[in-house]
Each structure stands twice: as C-alpha cells, then as structure tokens.
Image: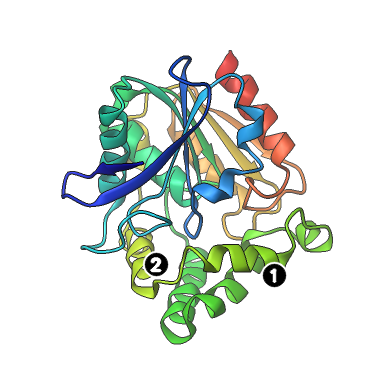
Amino acid sequence: MFCKTQDGLNLYYEWQGLENTGETLVLLNGLTQSTLSWGLVTPYFKTTYRILLLDFVFQGQSDKTGHWRDFYQHADDVISVLDKEGITKAHILGLSYGSLVAQHLAVKHPGRLQKLMLVSTFAHKTPYYEAIELSWWRALEMGGYNLLLDIMLPSVLSEGYFSNPLIPIEAMKEMRRETNQNKEALLNLMRATKESGDFRPTLRRITAPTLIVQGEKDLLLPVHLANEVHLNIKGSRFIVIPNAGHTLNLEHVPDMCQLAAGFLAN
C-alpha cells in the first residue's frame, strides 16, 4: 500500500499481525534497510499487535525523488500513514536511523505515542562517528552501494555474527542490493544524519514511556552514546544486550524481542 506524504511523494507501507483490532506497533528501518528487514522480528509480535512496516522516502518501495529530508520530515511521513489508517496512537520501535526518526516523532507528535523503544540509538555525533560517516559517504560516491556495504557491515554486525550468521553475509548483501540501487537516494537518506546536530537537550521533551536497548559490542554506536540518550529522557529504561552488535533485527533477535514484548505489555 502507499500513502501520500505532505509533499506528494509515495510512501510504501504494509500491515502484518492482527487484522483491524488490537494495538499498533510501528517498526522503523535502519539506514540501508527496508520492510523486508523485519522478517526475524515480526513473528514475535504477530499474535498480539497490528504491525505497521514502512519504507522511508528514499528507501525500499517508496519514492526516491525530491529534496533530502530531515528527521522531523521523516517523522511527519510516519504520521501521514497513521492518519490515513485512522490510528490515533501507536507504539513506536525505531532501529538505528529509525530510532532517530522515532526520537523526533516523540518530540514533535507526543500525543501520538503509547510507548517508545529506541534500539541502537544515539543523539549526537562524536568525531569517531563522523569519521565512519565520512568513509560511508565517500564509499558510496566513489564505488556505489557494493563498496558501501563492504565497508559498512563490519561496523554494524558483531564479530560473533560473522562466525555464525543467521543470514549468510553474501545473501544479505544481495538482498540489500535489490532495494538500494539508487546511489542518490541513499545519499539523500544519509544527509539527514550528516546535517543533524546535538539532539540531547531536545530529548528532555519526550514524555512517552521509553526503553533504550543497545548492543554491548556495537562498534558504530558505543554503549555510552545510548546511555546519554537514556540520561536525557526522564524515566527511561536502559538495557545493554551482552555480546550483541548494532543490527539487532539480525542478531540477538530473541533477546531484543523479549525485551520489547515485556516493555510493551507492562
């Protein structure tokens, strides 16, 4: 299904889980992901929630044209889908890039959230992060998506994942290539992070019950960055998953989903 954004672009979304009843759980993708990326996660919630999956503009099956979007604009796009479907409130779970959209949504549209879950998250860029970001940007410009993936994966998956992958690395690369062929679209997605500032003070405006989950061995976003998010959201809970990396919809999935299910149910 598609929803028109405020500026007339087509945003792809789909439903899984319960039909026309129950609370809504929205899952927000990481940077190079799509709705296909939640296949290991959705089985944990299909019998208890209506699950809304969507591709941000420049991702997956959504439009890949137009000016780059900041995170508030991405958040408005999520609200457009909720409005179209007549959903007043929803639980929001955002992973990595999606967690930044979720933060901005919680600030700008506080009345639309039931609970907020931020997975593999941060709110400001360190010099270390900026160095990684620059390497990704240059890889994409010079070598396209294939080179970007080769450089990206070692920083977003743990060492343990490479030893025992749920999805073989080459199969994962091929799956992502199918939905990320447009170099300019990816650059537009990355621009939101590149242009972002320090969001920590703004986090203090979030009032929704919030759970923050981070992998102990997240190389891209070390644990202390997520802890700073926790310290700036009043009443939030913070849990670190031992030995886990960054992409928690591909590794340590049972741990992440059990934490999410417990948080959402109580």
Sequence-wise first label, 2 or 1: 1
Amino acid type of disc 2?
A: Leu
Q: Residue under circle 2?
A: 186
Provide residue 88's location: percent of width, then percent of height.
31, 19
Residue 208 vs residue 23, the one in the foreground: 23
From the viewer's perspective, tell me whether residue 236 is left or right of residue 47.
Answer: left
Task: Identify the residue shown where x is 58% and y is 19%.
Answer: 48
Quote the CA–CA distance across marks 2 and 1: 20 Å
Provide residue 254's location: percent of width, then percent of height.
73, 36
Q: Residue under circle 1?
A: 170
Q: Tell me the element at label 2.
A: helix
Q: Tell me the element at label 1.
A: helix
**Quadrant in the picture for the N terminus:** top left
Question: Around disc 1, counting alpha carbons within 10 Å, would you say few (fewer than 14), some (14 to 19), or many (20 or more)?
Answer: few
Tell me the quarter of the picture where residue 214 sits: top right
Farthest residue, direction right: 163
From the viewer's perspective, tell me whether residue 154 is left or right of residue 234.
Answer: right
Amino acid type of disc 1?
A: Glu
From the image, state whether disc 2 or disc 1 is nearer to you.
1
Provide residue 98's location: percent of width, then percent of height.
45, 46
From the viewer's perspective, tell me whether residue 258 is left or right of residue 119.
Answer: right
From the viewer's perspective, tell me whether residue 213 is left or right of residue 122.
Answer: right
Provide residue 212's location: percent of width, then percent of height.
55, 35
Residue 87, placed above or below residue 126: above
Question: Around disc 2, counting alpha carbons within 10 Å, would you say few (fewer than 14), some (14 to 19), or many (20 or more)?
Answer: many
Residue 205 vs residue 16, the one in the foreground: 16
Tell me the quarter of the picture where residue 219 sits: bottom right
